[in-house]
Amino acid sequence: MRTLLTNGKIYDGTGSDPFTGDVLVDGERIVAVGPSLKEEADKVIDLKGLSISSGFFDAHSHNDWFCIKKEPRKYLEPFIRQGITSFITGNCGLSAVGFEPDTPNVDKVGGGLFGYRGGTTTGVYPTVKSFFEAIDRNNPCNIAVLVGHCTARTSVMGNENREPSPEEKERMLGIMEQGLKDGACGLSLGMMYEPGRYASVAETRDVALLAEKYNLPLTVHARALSAITLDYPMLGKAHNLRALDELVEMSRGTHLKLQYSHAIFVGTSSFKTKDALHRTLDDLREQGVDAWFDIYNELLGVSVITVFLPGWFQSLSAADRRKPLTKIRFAILANMSMMMLGFGWKTIVIAYLGPGMEQYEGKTVAQIAKEWGKSCVDTYMDLCEMSNFNGRVNMGPYSTPEIIEWQSKRDNVLYMTDAWVEDYGVQNPAIYDCFPKFIRDSLLGKGDTMPRTIRKMTGGVADRFSIPERGYLKPGYFADLTVFDEAEMTAATPDQEKAFGIKRVFINGNEVLTDGVLDAEAIKTSGHAMKAAA
């Protein structure tokens, strides 16, 4: 079917100024873009001055784990509603692909955050090839995938804290290289997760050289994202900067496409490291390393409830955890950590504890402590135990509006959500309106210019990850389109659990969202697997 969208304000994804014109779609492809197209069409949509761009790309996602769910719609629908049509997945070393079919360690793949557990997926997909075959035209959105180092390492040697043997290293790198040959859009490291946290610089450099060989990005979740952690000595250089030093050493002398994942500053004491972190990335660029970063438009993040719980405390019996000296020791460490980081019990919001405990969701630890008439430390320990140490919290600050505005204007930044839909509890707000907020900020003069903002969520991502025929409004390209209302976005107050300003979304020529109404039938098969053109 031929569809003509007329009278639109066209952002073509190049960063050029918008122009008024038409877009003609035939089947899955764009066939013409320009002013006043005189073309016949089966359907004509008068946009009446609304803006239109290529569908938004989420540059950092974990939706490889959710597009293979038996019912993927609920996991991807919120992203479609904010104009996102395509994802770069497999980040933080925790890809759903990239392991040996006969590995005994499938249950460990996903690092505890994700995994092939409970029979909720349509299958198990060890290779990029099998994953692409499973999802192509069988899920709502377009999916590209990175091959995760954590996944490959887990396949070969589980979660062992040691250097791989020469044979194990060869197998691990072989898995990742085969993924690149099969169309993966790069590799990813997760230095904060098992077993990535056990990798030496020498090991990560091997991964970096492999990514460089194929001229594809290596995305990295660094070992520390805050000024203070448990991974480095307490005195001296801020820990997130030390973690970045590891990446400098790893990439020295290369022309690696290094993608520093989610450039956040966890806790107020980390904010002062902003300039030094970006100076280091700029220095890398001057030395020939193609260093970029990505950000989301949120001030908080999602974490496990045990984020402030030392491992030694969790390993104790329930009786030992309640001993006065143990509680005093933990209270001192917890309060000291929060003070040094710049957190507080008033900023830790319970997102999920478990069935039957929904009354605590959305409340801070401090609020619950007041209701219970207990100290915050005792309350926190109780909440951890009530959730069997498996609860989830939303916490912040991870950034400020001023930092996000400053970062969003830099030349080497891409936009993303780093969010996924949870089955229960309070959601990460980034699933709802992260991309509309980037546009709103731009329109209000608090972000980059509109043409550059749109590029950073469309053509810029496609170029960075070598995704062909996506990200631009060009003849011959796939018809991923997002139509949005700039006036509505400017007037919106983005504090609600829904997107705003997005009027129409097309994925591969299928109109899947129209004025807030989702076409449930169309999105069953609207998405494609996206192979990189390495």
Image (spheres, grey):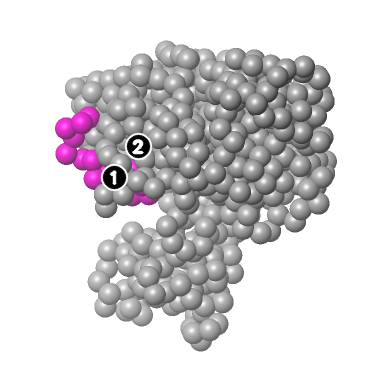
Amino acid type for the residue under numbered disc 1: Tyr
- In reply to whether residue 112 is colored magenta, the answer given is yes
**Residue at the image position 70 percent from the left and 19 percent from the top:** 40
Which element is circle 2 on? loop
Q: Residues within 10 Å of mark 1 (few under 14, many from 20)?
A: some
Looking at the figure, which quarter contains the N terminus?
A: top right
Residue 450's place in the image compared with 72, above or below, is: above
Which element is circle 1 on? loop
Secondary structure mostly taken by the magenta-highlighted segment of the chain: loop
Along the line of sight, the residue nearer the viewer: 445 or 80: 80
List x then y, in percent, for residue 521. 48, 42
Q: Which residue is mark 2?
A: 96
Q: Residue furthest bottom?
A: 373
Identify the image quadrant of residue 485: top right
Marks 2 and 1: CB-CB under 8 Å? yes
Along the line of sight, the residue nearer the viewer: 374 or 494: 494
List x then y, in percent, for residue 168. 21, 26
Using the rendered image of the protein, determine whether residue 16 is visible from the camera's viewpoint.
yes
Report, in whole angstroms, how far the alpha carbon at label 2 lies from the one at label 1.
8 Å
List x then y, in percent, for residue 457. 64, 32
Which circle marks residue 237 in the picture?
A: none
